[in-house]
Amino acid sequence: MLRVIVMLFFAVLSFTSPASAAEEGRIAVVYPDIGEPYRGIFTSIVEGIEGKLGATVASYPVSAKTDISELKTSLQRQNTRVIIALGRQGMRVATELSGIAEVVVGGVLTVPEDEARVQPVISLSPDPALLFARMKALMPTARRVFVVYDPAVNGWLIKLAREAARAKGLELVAYEAQDLRSAVMFYQEIFSMANGRSDVLWLPQDSTTVEERSILPLVLQESWNQNIAVFSSNSSHVRRGVLFSLYPNNMALGKSLAGLAQDILVSGGYARRGMMPLRDVQSAVNLRTAKHLGLNPNGQQGFDMTFPEQ
Amino acid sequence: MPMKKALNNFLQEFTFERQLGIMVTLGILFLALSSSLVGSWQSNERVRLNLLEQGQRITENLASQSALALIYASADNAADAVSATMAFPGVVSVEIRDVSQRVLLTHGSTDHAEFLTIVERDDSAQTAAALDAESRDAWRFAAPVYTHPSAESPFNVQTATPELLGHVYVVMSKAALTQTTTDIFVANLATSFSFALLLLFLIRFLTNHMTRPLNQLSASMARAEAGEFNVRARLSGPKDIADMAHAFNSMMSVLEERKLDLLMLNETLEQRVAEEAAKNREKDHMLIQQSRLAAIGEMIGNIAHQWRQPINTLTLLLGNIKDAHEFNELDKDYLDKSVKEGQMVIQRMSTTIDDFRNFFRPNKEKNCFSVNEVVADVLRILEAAFQSSGITIVVKGDEDVTAYGYRNEYSQVLINILVNAKDALQERKVLAGSVQISIFRRDDLSKVVVEDNAGGIPTDVLQKMFDPYFTTKEKGTGIGLYMSKMIIENNMNGSIKACNTRNGAQLSLIVPSCRPEPA
């Protein structure tokens, strides 16, 4: 009996071992054929995937000129069952290959709802729960979180944000703006009513409501003037003066994507579908802003990047 | 037509040099003017395009700097950009309007109603600055103002579309274009005319270089035409003109050679004419000699004919004297009578010799002679021959008809004519052959007409009968009638003509009569 159990165990192990899955080429990665600095990001993600799988994974750089039929033939030859699609181009190619394999998407900010519904997508937008947790850690007095968002882009994220805010005892005040002028109006409204002690402003990854050239400067200036803490889902904003941001840990993201792929292989189908926020994050803080706001971020502990750079 | 007439006048009245000068001058001036105009027009177009491009760039620049002002509906945010735009030369006014066309900011003064010409643009051009409208004095540019989405990243699945925030309008004056066009035109004109002037001088120099040898050649030709000798053109100027001059010189050389030959020919001509005349005279002399010899032969025949009878008579007389002696009938009376008769016969024979001698002695001078006497002399010689042939001769007409010329030659002609008539009558065996000689006096002319009944002269013979060496006789010389014609027409200023009558032929001799002696 024991012998049977042991044999069964090893059989299952061999069947599900990462090395086995990768060796059979059943997981492949397609990612954008692009130059730096983006190539480095995708390379890190692929490294994460390979780290999780424990072996080299077949990875295909793709572009608009990629011969889909040739790629399809190659994947089929390798008996690929799960394709990890990175970035916009990877996702577009994987969509055309979905007939031959299941797809896991990563390395994208957001996906239209009808596309996100059919497969699991790990977004590059940090989980609001993590953001709010970090916010509360930095500014315990925070009570209200303002956000201006485009529902077409971040509707799914704000849903999660409401739950996360509730869990953290925060009030999420979300304004829907579908164009820039509306967003400006809302920001002006926010700054007219917000106070620095208890109100914070969240800037999601949203090109409409967090427009770099016209809105961000306004937000940064007003928030500085009114001592209102601003945190962002875009790490580049920290350099410009936002208090803190969470940004992707590419390697960890890769591992998560690989984990999803393995689950699909094991279960034979999607366990989860739809948009998922990024939980594999790193953090950046602007100490100058923190000082201006009278906050003490415990020196540099807990943050992976600080600005101004030391 | 007046144009054509004027052109013809121009082409005919002016010298080649003048024509060339006028045409080249007009051509160069026209070229200068037209090139200035074309150059100005082209430059105008280029300047216009440049200004349009500049206007578009200014408008685009303003649009890119107006986004914030439109986003925040705050004119202050665009004040600097507007001021900078107004500082551009030619910019008259600036306007920023939001999406609803509400004016956010305006600077400068423009009456938009003056822009009657609206430039239609397709939708694809709506994203960039473009010429929106145009008036006589200004252009109006419009540019949309959009948001500037972040640079596309490989993480964005959805491409952010730029959002239209409003429009900016920039009005630029055309004064710069007008001024530039005028300046360019004036500069082009000045430059063109300067070069035209220079070119004119150069062409004038070249035309002189070309026309001088042409004029020299023309002068040489004029001298040659005037008859000057040894005219040669100078070999100068362009190659083709030098070739023309060379050809002219060659032509002149050949011409002068021919002239010399002609002169020599003329000089020897007299000599050759004289030689030929002498040859002709010799020939005529020979012809005359031949004719005379022929006539002599004829005459000897006639003499023989005339002497036959007297000789027979003498023979008979001598025979009678012998018979008388034999029959003892010869006495002094009989002998005296016979001798006297014999002497008369001999006298007649001697007269014939004299007639023959006189007849063939050529006259050296023209004299007045009696035509009637000449006819009588000729008949005396030929009477016997005609009688023996059974041909009757009739003479009628005027008495005392005279002629001025050579008597013996005249007689020779008459003999020739009468002998021809006799031969014709004999040849045609005319039974009652007759020859009628009519002598007339008409004004200052004497006319002798010899008419026979031998049946006439054939037409083809009639035309050639006076030609030398033409004869219808088997043993004829063909010079008798020719010599007769020469004698009567050339030597005696008369005429000899032949025609046919009803029964035979008629020959007419017309010779000037003697002039009456002054009283």
Image (tube, coloured by chain):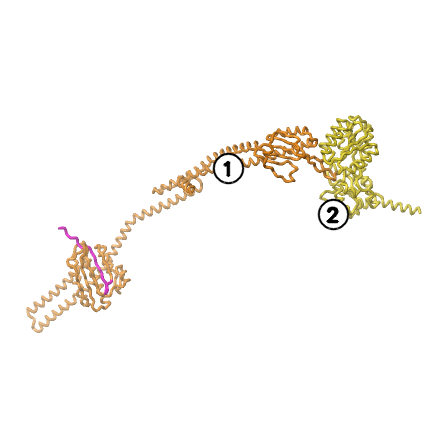
Chain colours: A yellow, B orange
> Which of the image's four quarters has the N terminus of chain B?
top left
Of all chains, the one bearing label 2 is A
Q: In the rendering, at what x and y percent does residue B368 appear?
A: 16, 55
Disc 2, SS = helix
Q: Amino acid at mark 1?
A: Ser
Q: Residues within 10 Å of mark 1 (few under 14, many from 20)?
A: some
Disc 1, SS = helix
Q: Residue at x 10, y 72 (%)?
A: B323
Q: On the rendered structure, is B434 left or right of B236?
A: left
Q: Residues within 10 Å of mark 2 (few under 14, many from 20)?
A: few
Report if residue B514 lies within the magenta region: yes
Residue occupied by mark 1: B34
Tell me, for residue A69, which label it has, or none: 2
Q: Amino acid at mark 2?
A: Ser
Tell me, for residue B342, which label it has, or none: none
For residue B405, say whether it is visible: no
Q: In the rendering, at what x and y percent does residue B209 appear?
A: 44, 37
Q: On the rendered structure, is B474 left or right of B317?
A: right
Report if residue A250 lies within the magenta region: no
Magenta segment boundaries in residue numbering:
B500-519
